[in-house]
Image: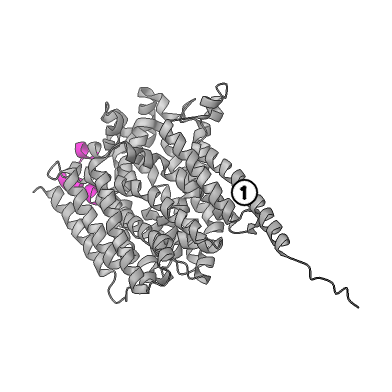
């Protein structure tokens, strides 16, 4: 067993210990399991939200996109920073309503706001469908990182299996508390590793960051600008806006919001997190450096650029630390995703069919859902396949279809009622599903449409249709309900006998 693998296993054991230890002194019930009894302060909220940003994407996707797609990768810090800015006004409203109405999940929120358990059921299924691909991506990424960093001493499948077991154990025992404590370790590691690599590698190979980009410009100038078509300016802008509004509607992010102690914690994080997110740029620097130093990576192999450059540059003990940080960037997000998806299914589905279930029964069912979700995700991790790729593409666009209902939930819902919300969501999801499966674009229906319009994110187009349908259905159903009330009302007969 080499020193890199020893370091990775040591951090895996430490993460498991912290995750289990997190429940010490607490009596675990549904509230504690799901949202920490709404008692997390600014620091834990910061670490948990940051945990949703610094995932295996930092190690694989971020540097990989810079390597393969160039400037298009900058949409990631752009949308995340914008999401935090928007959250300053939106998120405290969500927290306040949840606190007043004892809400512990995203489906709970929508069901309560629109007085519709069926809408809660729809939201719970959409949230789970959107999260499973992300869990799979984290598990696959974990396997790749650990396998590469251990110089092949452990297979990707074995590493993914161990990671899934660790996350499942401490989620079932500690719920969101386990995620919070492992997030402390993860953020210390990621802060050190990503900043160190992002600064050291450009200076080591090029003498600085500016010389790095001059070298890239000389070899691959197209990577430093957005494309004229495809990943173009209109794609960039529409995707940034779509993902920014959708970020806190991912069930894992929504759950973290509900776990906050107060509105002040959420507002502080909205101010500070954009600065922390800029650290993603260091991952991009590594990807751009790999264009010069490790040319020839094709397709999905571009995601290995950071790890291959690390292996080429450093001694095994440094590689082990980098691998340990990569391990933690998978464990924390996976644990929050498992917990939030399970609680969503419990509140949106199980409570609908068993409304009188006790707190203990709800907690047990939530843990059973954790096991079911991780088994399904692990099957996808092992088998892969086109179905997963399709789900991954659809995830953010799926969640984005909840945005109109969320925004209108803050106002008078006469123009956007529960019938309209469900009709809009279903229509938007159907458009996303059709476009993803068939690859359809606006140009297929309108051949003369300019690229700047054709490149607009399909999820954004679906959301626009979603709003129109929701408002029309809401107005129609309001009219029918009003007419029905008038018809059932009969004016008392006048006494004609004097």
Neighbourhood count class around disc 1 (C-alpha, 10 Å): few under 14, some 14–19, many 20 upward: many
In the image, is 238 to the left or to the right of 277?
A: right
| Segment tinted magenta in the rendering | 310-324
In the image, is 53 to the left or to the right of 460?
A: left
Say whether residue 494 is magenta: no
The picture places residue 236, in percent across and down from the top left corner, at: 49, 36
Quarter location, residue 121: bottom left
Give the number of marks. 1
Q: What element does badge 1 sit on? A: helix
Q: Residue at x 44, y 66 (%)?
A: 104
Q: How is the image coloured?
A: one colour
Q: Which residue is mark 1?
A: 473
Direction left: furthest residue: 1
Residue 208 visible from this viewpoint: no
Q: Main secondary structure of the magenta part?
A: helix
Say whether residue 321 is magenta: yes
Q: Nearer the viewer, residue 339 or 69?
A: 339
Q: Looking at the picture, does residue 142 appear above or below residue 418?
A: above
Q: Nearer the viewer, residue 431 or 206?
A: 431
Q: Residue at x 22, y 53 (%)?
A: 163
Residue 205 visible from this viewpoint: yes
Direction right: furthest residue: 498
In the image, is 109 to the left or to the right of 32?
A: right
Q: Residue at x 43, y 56 (%)?
A: 124
The picture places residue 215, in percent across and down from the top left corner, at: 35, 27
The picture places residue 251, in percent across and down from the top left corner, at: 42, 55
The picture places residue 275, in percent across and down from the top left corner, at: 45, 51
Quarter location, residue 178: bottom left
* Quadrant in which the C terminus is drawn: bottom right
Q: Looking at the picture, does residue 449 appear above or below residue 343?
A: above
Q: Residue at x 28, y 56 (%)?
A: 372
């Amino acid at each position: 067993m080499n020193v890199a693998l020893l370091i990775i296993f040591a951090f895996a054991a430490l993460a498991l210990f912290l995750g289990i230890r997190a429940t010490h002194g607490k009596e675990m019930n549904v509230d504690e399991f799901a949202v920490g009894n709404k008692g997390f302060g600014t620091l834990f909220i910061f670490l948990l939200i940051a945990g949703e940003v610094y995932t295996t994407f930092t190690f694989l996707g971020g540097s990989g996109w810079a390597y393969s797609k160039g400037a298009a990768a900058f949409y990631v810090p752009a949308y995340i920073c914008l999401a935090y800015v928007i959250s300053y006004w939106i998120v405290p409203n969500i927290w306040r309503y949840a606190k007043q109405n004892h809400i512990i999940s995203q489906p709970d929120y929508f069901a309560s706001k629109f007085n519709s358990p069926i809408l809660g059921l729809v939201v719970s299924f959409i949230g789970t469908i959107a999260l499973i691909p992300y869990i799979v991506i984290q598990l696959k990424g974990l396997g790749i990182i650990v396998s590469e960093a251990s110089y092949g001493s452990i297979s990707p499948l074995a590493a993914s299996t161990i990671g899934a077991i660790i996350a499942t154990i401490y989620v079932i025992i500690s719920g969101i508390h386990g995620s919070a404590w492992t997030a402390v370790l993860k953020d210390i590691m990621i802060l050190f590793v990503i900043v160190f690599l992002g600064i050291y590698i450009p200076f080591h190979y090029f003498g600085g960051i500016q010389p790095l980009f001059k070298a890239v410009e000389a070899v691959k100038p197209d990577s430093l600008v957005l494309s004229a078509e495809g990943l173009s300016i209109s794609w960039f802008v529409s995707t940034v806006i779509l993902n920014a509004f959708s970020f806190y509607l991912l069930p894992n992010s929504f759950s973290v919001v509900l776990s906050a102690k107060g509105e002040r914690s959420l507002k502080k994080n909205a101010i500070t997190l954009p600065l922390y997110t800029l650290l993603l740029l260091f991952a991009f620097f590594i990807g751009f450096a790999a264009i010069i130093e490790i040319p020839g990576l094709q397709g999905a192999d571009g995601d290995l650029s950071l790890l291959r450059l690390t292996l080429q540059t450093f001694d095994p003990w440094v590689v082990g630390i980098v691998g340990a940080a990569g391990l933690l960037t998978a464990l924390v997000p996976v644990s929050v995703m498992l917990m939030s998806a399970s609680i969503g299914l419990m509140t949106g589905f199980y409570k609908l069919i068993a409304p009188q279930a006790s707190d203990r029964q709800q907690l047990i069912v939530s843990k059973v859902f954790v096991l079911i979700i991780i088994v399904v995700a692990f099957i996808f991790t092992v088998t892969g396949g086109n179905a997963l790729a399709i789900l991954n593409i659809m995830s953010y666009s799926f969640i984005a279809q909840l945005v109109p209902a969320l925004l209108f939930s803050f106002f008078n819902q006469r123009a956007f009622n529960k019938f309209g919300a469900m009709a809009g969501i279903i229509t938007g999801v159907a458009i996303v599903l059709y476009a993803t499966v068939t690859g359809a674009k606006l140009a297929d229906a309108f051949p003369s449409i300019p690229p700047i319009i054709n490149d607009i994110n399909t999820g954004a187009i679906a959301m626009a249709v979603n709003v129109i349908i929701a408002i029309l259905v809401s107005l129609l159903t309001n009219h029918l309900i009003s007419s029905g009330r008038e018809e059932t009302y009969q004016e008392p007969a006048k006494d004609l006998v004097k």
